[in-house]
Amino acid sequence: MRKSLYISLMCLSALLQTPLFPPPTWAQTPNRLEKTASDVIAATLNYRAALERVLAIYERDLARRAELAELRQDLFEREVISKREFEDGRRAQAEAQKSVDETRAAIADTDRMLTEARMAEAMARLTPLARGAYEETPGLARFNGLAAWSLAEDTPRLQQFFLGRFGRTLPISAFGQTALHDRMGFDHRHAVDLAVHPDSPEGRALMQHLRDQGIPFIAAWGAIPGSTSGAHIHVGQPSPRISVRR
């Protein structure tokens, strides 16, 4: 049983490690960008559904392992089984928990991927913003700030603002280009993603601060309807682009 579950997860991981669509070799028009983003969304939704099925299996396995561990605890305390048998059960429970945690983390990554792809799809449909303009549409806000944004120099200032305002570390979910963006073919080299919901007090304060500083950003309300999963603020260039490999 464990071997088959492991193979299933490895197959899913292999899928995630490969690009979800062939990287383009030319500059893309808005319509082509929209089509590419739509392809990413479809593939990612299929992948997420597969992860959900694997997660359900792992959660059932974890529940069974937890029951067995509790039983072994009782048997060990009554000196019916050895310490080694007791510890073997605890290790099996820990492994089952790790499988659940890793799959949940993969689903969270997938939700971020969906949000990025849906952001790109939505941006492809919109007309470019004038310099300094701000716009909110359902599920998306964007600001084409006039200030020059530097990932290395301006991120620490943003961290200081957030720490001073809210007393905690700025929740950065993606700093520059990541493996996730490589797999999606998105150019994220000069941007930072913040795991902050745009409607939260932190999100509204961050967006106002970015506008005051003239820093461009895109705020997305998430990938799954009715869920905050994937909601974030993308700081940097206001148009997520499909990278071109040369």
Image: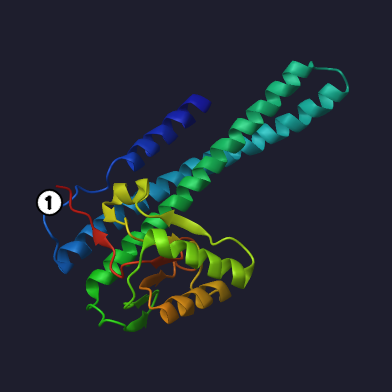
* Direction from residue 19 to residue 84 in the image, left or right: right
* Direction from residue 99 to residue 112 in the image, left or right: left
Residue at figure coordinates x 27%, y 45% from the top left: 19
Q: Is residue 240 visible?
A: yes
117 is higher (above) or lower (below) than 162: above
Query: Could you tell me residue 32's position as x and y percent?
Result: 16, 63
Query: Could you tell me residue 97's position as x and y percent?
Result: 61, 37
Examine the image and state in which quarter residue 233 appears. Answer: bottom left
Examine the image and state in which quarter residue 79 appears. Answer: top right
Q: Which residue is mark 1?
A: 25
Callout 1 crowding tier (Cα within 10 Å): few <14, some 14–19, many ≥20: few
Query: Could you tell me residue 35's position as x and y percent?
Result: 20, 61
155 is higher (above) or lower (below) than 53: below
Residue at figure coordinates x 56%, y 41% from the top left: 100
Q: 123 or 132, which lies in front?
A: 132
85 is higher (above) or lower (below) than 140: above
| Mark 1: amino acid | Thr
Residue at figure coordinates x 73%, y 30% from the top left: 69
Q: 131 or 74, which lies in front?
A: 131
